[in-house]
Amino acid sequence: MSTTDKQLRVGMVGYAFMGAAHSQAWRTVNRVYDLPARARMALICGRDTGKVAEAADRLGWEAYTTDWRDLIARDDVDVVDVCTPGDSHAEIALAALAAGKHVLCEKPLANTVSEARAMAAAAATAQAAGVRSMCGFNYRRVPAVTMMRQLVADGRLGVIRHVRATYLQDWIVDPQFPLVWRLQKDKAGSGALGDIGAHIIDLTQYVTGQLITGVSAVTETFVKERPLPAGSSGLAATVDGDGHRPATGPVTVDDAAVFVARLDGGALATYEASRFATGRKNALRVEINGSLGSVVFDLERLNELEFYDATRPAAEQGFSRILVTEGEHPYMSAWWPPGHIIGYEHSFTHQMRDFIEAVATGVDPAPSFADALQVQLVLDAVGRSAELGSSWTDVEPALATVAA
Amino acid sequence: MSTTDKQLRVGMVGYAFMGAAHSQAWRTVNRVYDLPARARMALICGRDTGKVAEAADRLGWEAYTTDWRDLIARDDVDVVDVCTPGDSHAEIALAALAAGKHVLCEKPLANTVSEARAMAAAAATAQAAGVRSMCGFNYRRVPAVTMMRQLVADGRLGVIRHVRATYLQDWIVDPQFPLVWRLQKDKAGSGALGDIGAHIIDLTQYVTGQLITGVSAVTETFVKERPLPAGSSGLAATVDGDGHRPATGPVTVDDAAVFVARLDGGALATYEASRFATGRKNALRVEINGSLGSVVFDLERLNELEFYDATRPAAEQGFSRILVTEGEHPYMSAWWPPGHIIGYEHSFTHQMRDFIEAVATGVDPAPSFADALQVQLVLDAVGRSAELGSSWTDVEPALATVAA
Amino acid sequence: MSTTDKQLRVGMVGYAFMGAAHSQAWRTVNRVYDLPARARMALICGRDTGKVAEAADRLGWEAYTTDWRDLIARDDVDVVDVCTPGDSHAEIALAALAAGKHVLCEKPLANTVSEARAMAAAAATAQAAGVRSMCGFNYRRVPAVTMMRQLVADGRLGVIRHVRATYLQDWIVDPQFPLVWRLQKDKAGSGALGDIGAHIIDLTQYVTGQLITGVSAVTETFVKERPLPAGSSGLAATVDGDGHRPATGPVTVDDAAVFVARLDGGALATYEASRFATGRKNALRVEINGSLGSVVFDLERLNELEFYDATRPAAEQGFSRILVTEGEHPYMSAWWPPGHIIGYEHSFTHQMRDFIEAVATGVDPAPSFADALQVQLVLDAVGRSAELGSSWTDVEPALATVAA
Amino acid sequence: MSTTDKQLRVGMVGYAFMGAAHSQAWRTVNRVYDLPARARMALICGRDTGKVAEAADRLGWEAYTTDWRDLIARDDVDVVDVCTPGDSHAEIALAALAAGKHVLCEKPLANTVSEARAMAAAAATAQAAGVRSMCGFNYRRVPAVTMMRQLVADGRLGVIRHVRATYLQDWIVDPQFPLVWRLQKDKAGSGALGDIGAHIIDLTQYVTGQLITGVSAVTETFVKERPLPAGSSGLAATVDGDGHRPATGPVTVDDAAVFVARLDGGALATYEASRFATGRKNALRVEINGSLGSVVFDLERLNELEFYDATRPAAEQGFSRILVTEGEHPYMSAWWPPGHIIGYEHSFTHQMRDFIEAVATGVDPAPSFADALQVQLVLDAVGRSAELGSSWTDVEPALATVAA
């Protein structure tokens, strides 16, 4: 901290839920971690002048603009942080890379495979010029998730046999919940699948070190027509209507997506993403069973990891609830004393920590756009399988395409 | 108890794991419940004279025989309790029904659909003559499961959206675990699918009151060759071998089966049965999400039910851990004071309670052979889908067939 | 089982809650365990002819009597099992020992220290003549509790620093719950303290291998007057009253007792027994912290033990939820396959197993009457401290007294 | 935020664990909450120039000083935030109040009752002049704790019968852990008692709305001599020693304190604070049983509250795990979408939120110095009881003294 004067001037596009989370992380990261560069919250961008000005003031950005092209064009921005809905990721990120800016892009990388391919290709090109890019699968940086990856990488689970991943929410169970942008295919690309399913695809591939090679899928839209929204904030929204019945529109994305998958290391996996799981608020849960042990993670209790070590004496085997809050655990030595838990937003602070370190030291951060393209290819295979009566559908290879 | 002299003389075929569990239940049921008839443990049958004699003595049966045809032929047997491996269910049960004996047959009903069809048809015929039959899906009688059924039936969960069922064990994770009869298709019919998958199929159909109409499935045999067994007991076994490498044989059943299903009430469901889930000993877990609430059940904590009631005030909603041990709960008023838990075997005692009551009062117990046939048809559809690249596969209707 | 013709003919006095639990255990024990003698349920005793006859029939006893002196006088009774309220323990047990019968006496051993002293002295005398005696602290035989004892005995917890024990129930929270015998000092000796507090005193002394040397205590009776009861069963009861307000009587025992204690090995301990802990049905919970590890037990989840091993690598330390249902665990190899849980009543079956084995092989079972006297002395110290403004009060030594 | 230009210029004394936590809160609070004033991190104070300069830079304070008297004397400081060890609280806070500064003082308020009395008296005097003061019992602002208070205040628990509070840590289990300032009476006042016991005293009094009137206590120092420290950070420390055995010193505070208490509303309570509970990192746990319901809180899972509502239908009663992360819950509407959890540090942000609002709107924040004095009086009674053989010891009244 006091050891560097090097700055990374960040320009962030978008200021809704993700924009607020990223702001908190940019604001905090250098206060907690000793890093080779300092992030400076230089510029924020949004289309509405009044709103973006208010956001800049509230979230603590030095300046604002209403034109993302302006943000990219400026010399005093080193990093472009893309926090918009998925339909604008490709255009902004491609322009930023072309302008030589380091790019952090929220997930999912894009709304379509072709966009994601173009972005991965552009990132590969930019990389040669020392320009870094990263996709914001922030849950990789939850300490318990990072620890799962380490346990697998260290061989502590043996041969991975099963992956069991669900990401369950319930914010649209009510049929009167309005038709927000996340329920519109042109804005969001897909529904639960791309929004939260993408997280468990990336997380499980990261933790196992295996890639999904094929899937069999079913998707479902339980409520097919919803009232048009008046306004929204985060995942909450209000319905438009002036005393009479509100106008409605069609839900064009999935409410839920379930699929079976095979991973290239031999594991059999199940995935479920749903916004109709009553009582489950943000229930990303992953269980991995290997020949030597198992791990279980639950995002609603993200400070904990359950680890079953089958090499322990038989009578003492059990799932250990490890409180992943100690100095020995990833990212945690910079935070609080033993047993003092962290929250959701800390995963972003950890992400910014690694991003800053990678950019400042000239290495590529992970997950790369190519990694994120691979997730997009899985999403695509899921969609195709669902359309083809759940038939087994291979995931297209990412590398060949990127190379092409 | 003291109010009746009516007896039901039971003849049980088989004396391994299921035979021991049934014996404990027959021995206990009239000591706990006040019923219109008393079970008498009249006769036990097994092929090996020495072993069945020992079993009769140990388990408390009055007599034994080595010929199940003899057992069925006897006048002093009212009920035939079939506890053998699946390959002999059909033959024994059909003969017993033909002889006018009430039949309790362990699950799965049979190893093939055609056998199950024949059994359901015979049961329907026998029913007209006042002969009762029942399939031993004992988990329906775990009080928390019965309570789940009641909550759904009372509309407390609203429209069912999701079913999430897993039955995970880990007793064959070790590749050196021997090739016991449960791993041989000719004896067991299938592997994890029929043995434990059948339980979650029946349980979720029972609880939701909905039937599975179609599936997309994957099955897997992780370890394809195993040493031949020297002996086995329950789920434990020893390997044959005299100092040199033991002889091996092919595993002809699935180690794991996963499938997605749709239920006839509109629910989307996922199922997983595996014997390779390290650390999971007997982890039958079911979660059901409806528009008004959710329930969660875990067989390893079978005295508990989690219930989320979405009609409660928003700030107080949560999954309630209900200790299903109170006098208000199904089956429990006959047992112990508040909070005193019961075990696995009690589900059999409850099953015998309902069976005795049904037989003595002349009504049909559930699940019927027709219900069990329906489970068999789901198992069959799973097998076919897995062979056809996970293509969506409709479950054949049971009723038409039985009627035919 | 088939290996012996040796019989132990049991005569049981009492047939309420404890009588039913003991009956289930006597009936089951030789069906599950291979033992050097068989228990025969020979004779049951109760004061009311009709009721005891009905109990004999229902619970499966060969004969009944209404006079416990007759039961003790008979030649065809080898074991006297005392299941009456505490006020008659001493008289019956002393007579039984004097008659040369082996005695199993329910806890607490007696209602007063002087009775308990006399019983321990008589047991010591009888022991010289080969007569065995045991007090029914059945929770010692919950497999997870036995395993805790083994872990401590093996040094796995190091130096014990803390014991934290609660036994919480809520069956008299309602002020209209009637004045049953358990709320009357002349019948029950004390309230929560002797009924459930005695369990946690014995359990923690057993597990730690340390004795309580002194206490500081508070007791409380929240509801001082209650309606007189019409009838009771287990812990349930109904109120007498014919349309007008029921007659009431004073509660003469404690509703709750809390105390701090020191153990002779240096541990600092807290104890709480209450019948006013709303929502806690049978919540016996114990946590023990040592210099090398900790254990946690919860009777409502009696198939589980949490074990924290501080000698594991720092990053992997956590409380392991051990499912104590496996063949490697105490008492469990005779029961069901992996992960199949047992219930409350099994602790009695295990108790009978050890009692039969001890009697048949001529060794003394534990806990002895002397052990139970020590618990009584702790109860006494608690009562005295509570009366003396919580002043630190030493527990009288048991051994010296017995020796005298 | 954009709605105000009013500033509160904060001067913070101390920059260790508490200083870092407060800094994170001051930095965040106006970014999340819309408040009538903005905190400005104006000045930080520490004795060592190099260290305080580094802390100012790292934690984001505009300026620093090495003299707290200077900090208090400055006109451009409105609020003095006291984050030093307890031995300097009184001197700094009294001077700050005398200078007309609003004061936020970390807990425990002081090391002695006489200091705390003086501080409470000064705060009462200053209050008349519009100067505000508050003691930093931050756990009151954990949303689940605030919600517990509301449930009790709304009568949802009925008459409170039992309070059960533990605060368990394990950071000094190793006898070689050095003699840091928290283990020295002259610096820390007491050990586990004042450091963490104070938290559970305040929390339970706050939640129940009842005050502790008397106690019976035991304290213990398990390890009486420890190596002298070389350096420390948070709760971690290193031992001094140059190859030979390090010098040692006496531990002059308690390692553990346990006490029984009575509250002025009739509740019976137990308290335990320990730094020797192996495996418990920051385990503040509270259970409260009332005639109509119970609540359970665990700081290691601070986003959850368990609530048992005994007015629900009997068969559905259970402890509900409420995820206290929703817009309906205290403090949470400003944070993230449903189910996204917060961490330890957020309790400080909430504290600053309430402090700023109180100061800006001219009302007194809670807990006041008088409230904190009352906690000090309980700590004092605990100490006296422990010295007097656990005799029941009344807590001195706070009000009379303050009035005097």
Image (cartoon, coloured by chain):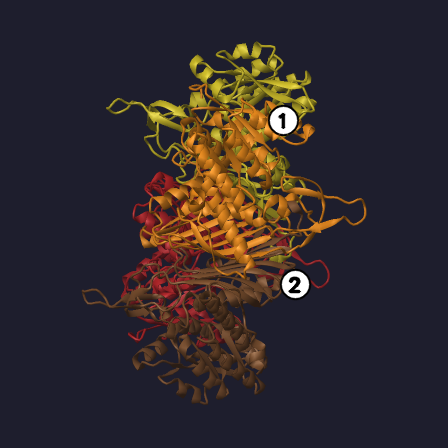
Chain colours: A brown, B orange, C yellow, D red
Residue type beneath disc 2: Asp
Question: Which residue is at the front of the view, B247 or C40?
Answer: B247
How many tags in the picture?
A: 2
Q: Position of residue D230 (x, y in %)?
A: 62, 63
Name the residue at the left extreme: A243
Q: Position of residue B97 (x, y in %)?
A: 50, 32
Structural crowding at the residue carrying mark 1, measured as other residues with C-alpha within 10 Å and reported as few (<14), some (14–19) or many (≥20): many
Structural crowding at the residue carrying mark 2, measured as other residues with C-alpha within 10 Å and reported as few (<14), some (14–19) or many (≥20): few
Name the residue at the front extreme: B404
The quadrant of the picture occupied by the C terminus of chain A is bottom right
Q: Position of residue B217 (x, y in %)?
A: 52, 57
Q: Residue at x 24, y 24 (%)?
A: C243
User: In this picture, is A131 found above or below B166?
Assistant: below
User: In this picture, is C67 found above or below A254?
Assistant: above
Question: Picture quarter containing residue A256?
Answer: bottom left
Instruction: Give the label on residue B65, or none.
Output: 1
Residue type beneath disc 1: Thr
Q: Position of residue B42 (x, y in %)?
A: 56, 24
Question: Which type of secondary structure does the marked residue at label 2 adopt?
Answer: loop
Instruction: Please tell me whether mark 2 or mark 1 is closer to you in this view.
Output: 1
Question: Picture quarter containing residue D140?
Answer: bottom left
Instruction: Give the label on residue A154, or none.
Output: 2
Q: Chain of mark 2?
A: A
Instruction: Give the label on residue D350, or none.
Output: none
Question: Which residue is at the front of the view, B210 or B235?
Answer: B210
Same chain for labels 2 and 1? Say yes or no.
no
Can see residue B228?
yes
Question: Which residue is at the front of the view, B370 or A191?
Answer: B370
Can see residue C392?
no
Alpha-carbon span between mark 2 and mark 1: 56 Å
